[in-house]
Structures are given as structure tokens and as C-alpha cells.
Image (cartoon, coloured by chain):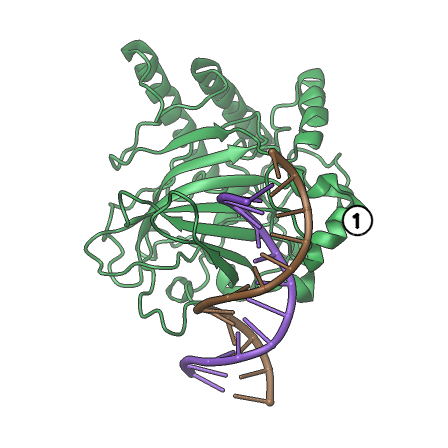
Chain colours: A green, B brown, C purple
Amino acid sequence: MEKALNWDQKTLINELTQGRELVKQLRIHLNPSSSSTGELLITKLLSSLHKSLLMLNGVKSEVEPQPTGLTIVTTTESPRSGSGSPRSDYDSDLIRDKSKKRKTLPRWTEQVRVCPGTGHEGPLDDGYSWRKYGQKDILGAKYPRGYYRCTHRNVQGCLAIRQVQRCDEDPSIFSVTYRGRHTCTQAPHLIPGQSPNRQNQDQKKKKSPETFINFQTLEVKTEDLDTQEFRSSSFSFPSTSPMGCLEKENNIFSSLTPDNHFMGNFSPPFISPTTSESNYLSPYRINSFGGQNLQTSESDLNEIISAATSASNSPILDLDLDLDLDFPVDFDSHFPFDTPGFFS
DNA sequence: CCGATTTGACCCGC
DNA sequence: GCGGGTCAAATCGG
């Protein structure tokens, strides 16, 4: 998307990126719970690398060289105060209680490609249970846009929403827009590393024989974020052909989550069973603390946080703090989110 | 029977 | 008025 930087920069970025990945791997190798100091150091290291990368790229993003050859781009999506915030039940709540909420819901878009050759395509499954509540033909778009919300919306009040739209030119590419974060404690199948062979399903049962098997995140766009991260998100579902699309990479889940760290917003359970046996270590944690993949989301909070960040010079304060009132914003940056029941 | 999807109507911001 | 987003009744499917 973005034009390429000059070669030196690219090389530099490449190196930094590699360094970052190495650090992440190092983190994995270290017993995460044993050394908080080590963890902190790593976090800081990552932060430095991250900042360097950001500086190189400016605020906007740039291509991160992919070991897999896949190009992932992260871009900032201009905030659109958006149309349509009609009254849905939950919307009404939000609107009545705090009208700003809706507009500032964290939002990011991912370009996801269904792997060709698998013969599978269709609804993307990121590990969460989505319930379709609408579909709409979009002007200028060849394919309709599907609207999904978290299945547990009613039960747990989870406000996560997802919009899926197939790309005009390349039907194998879906543009998946997420809005809001999952506040629900998702089903067990969400816990990656636990039972890799049971990660999709929940939705797409019926008439869509097409079960999503492999996809790649090509692009991640975020909105309301001033902290960007290049995302190297390439992953594949092992359902049929784990290596269908790409070779396994140990950074498969290095930076998948656009925003959620602990809330588990979009943490696809892409643990290739052939890739990782790290049962003892939840990738969530890795993700979460991949550290700076996290971003602030709510624009309002954003300001506050960025201010705080620059002021305190805290390394990883660009955590997603869209916790609203549910959560104090002052938790420690190296809070042990690996606590399983942390949110329940 | 229950939960998910479909689909036309409705709402709302621009 | 238009278009995007959501609702909700009807329908589907296990």
C-alpha cells in the first residue's frame, strides 16, 4: 500500500524487525513467570525496537519484510465519525449513556486472504463466535457486507462487532473490520495451545459448506490509533493442510492482536499444532506482551494515554486501555496477564 | 425446540 | 434523499 521506503531504510527496518522478533522468541524461551525482571527488560527492549521502527516509518506504517514472503501492511485508517449508529439495543445503551462511546469504539480492519487451493472459503473464523445480524449491499462493492456480532453479546454484554466484506477484485480476499473488543470470556476453544484441532466452528454451520480453513492476514488497518505496529500476521488453520499457505513461522502469533492483549479481542487460535507445543504458555500472553503490538484504541483515551506515555516515558504504555470504566488505567505495564482466570 | 441466518424494513448521519 | 448499519420476523437446520 504504502510506497516503499528507500533501501537503506528498508534494510534498517528489516534488521530492527528481525531483532524484535528475536527478542520475542527470547521471551518465549525464558520462563515467563519466573523472571519478571527479565520480562521487563525484554519488554523495554521491544519497546525500543518498536519505537525505532516507528521513527523510521513515521506514523504511518510500512511493509514489514516477511519471512514467508507475505507482505503485511498496517495502516492508519482515518477515523470516520461514521454513519449509522442507529439504535440497536446495545447501541442505545451506549448512545444514551455516553454517546461518544460508539464513535470511539476501537476499530481496525484486516485484509484476510483465503488460501487458494484449499477449496475453502467463506466466513472467516478468528476463533470467536460470531452471530450474523445483517447483510448489506454496499455501494460500489461487488459483494455484500456481512455484519456480525459476538454471540455472547446478550449473555455477557460483549460488544465486539465484525464486518466482513469480500474484495471486489480478488474474491479470495476479505476485508474484516472489527469494532469493539470482546469482553466476553470466550469458549474454551479459544484457548490456543489447548486443542488445536478444534478451533473453528461455531458459526458457519449451516448452509455454508465452505468452511474456512486457511487465510492470511494481509493487512491490518487500525483506527483511532496513533501507535502503529507492523504486523506480521500470517497464519493458517491446520484443519486440513497446516502448511497450505505458508510455511510455519515461529512468529506466527507474534503480533496478531491489533488491540487486545488480555481481552482477547482478536487472538486467533492459530497455533499450528505442528509448530508449537507450548501448551504451558498461552500465545495470548505472547501476543499480549509482544508488547507493542498493542495499541491504544479509543481516541479519547488515546490522548490521555499518549500524553501519559510521553510524560512518563513508559515503555509500553501504548497498551490498549479501552477498558472504560471497567478497568483502571493504571495497571502496571508488566502486569502478569498470563493469569488464566484474570478476567473472569 | 432452540439458536443461527436471511432479508426487508427501519433508523440515522451526512 | 442516500447509503451504511441494525432490527426483527421469518426461516432454516441440527
Residue A340, relative to residue A337: is it above or below? below
In the image, residue A185 above or below residue A225: below
Residue A143 rendering spot, x and y as whole percentages = 36, 52
| Quarter placement of the C terminus of chain A | bottom right
Indicate left or right for A213 with A138 as reference: left
Q: Which residue is drawn at the image coordinates 31% and 65% (left, top)?
A: A210
The answer to which of A194 and A244 lies nearer the viewer is: A244
Left of A132 or right of it: where is A199?
Answer: left
Of A206 and A230, nearer the camera is: A206
- As helix, strand or loop, the secondary structure at mark 1 comes to helix
What amino acid is labelled 1 in the image? Arg
Q: Nearer the viewer, residue A320 or C6?
A: C6
Q: Quadrant of residue A199?
A: bottom left
Using the rendered view, name the quadrant where residue A315 is placed: top right
Q: From the viewer's perspective, is A198 left or right of A258?
A: left
Kindly identify which residue carries mark 1. Answer: A96
With respect to residue B5, does A176 lie above or below?
A: above
**Residue at figure coordinates x 48%, y 50% from the top left:** A163
Q: Chain of mark 1?
A: A
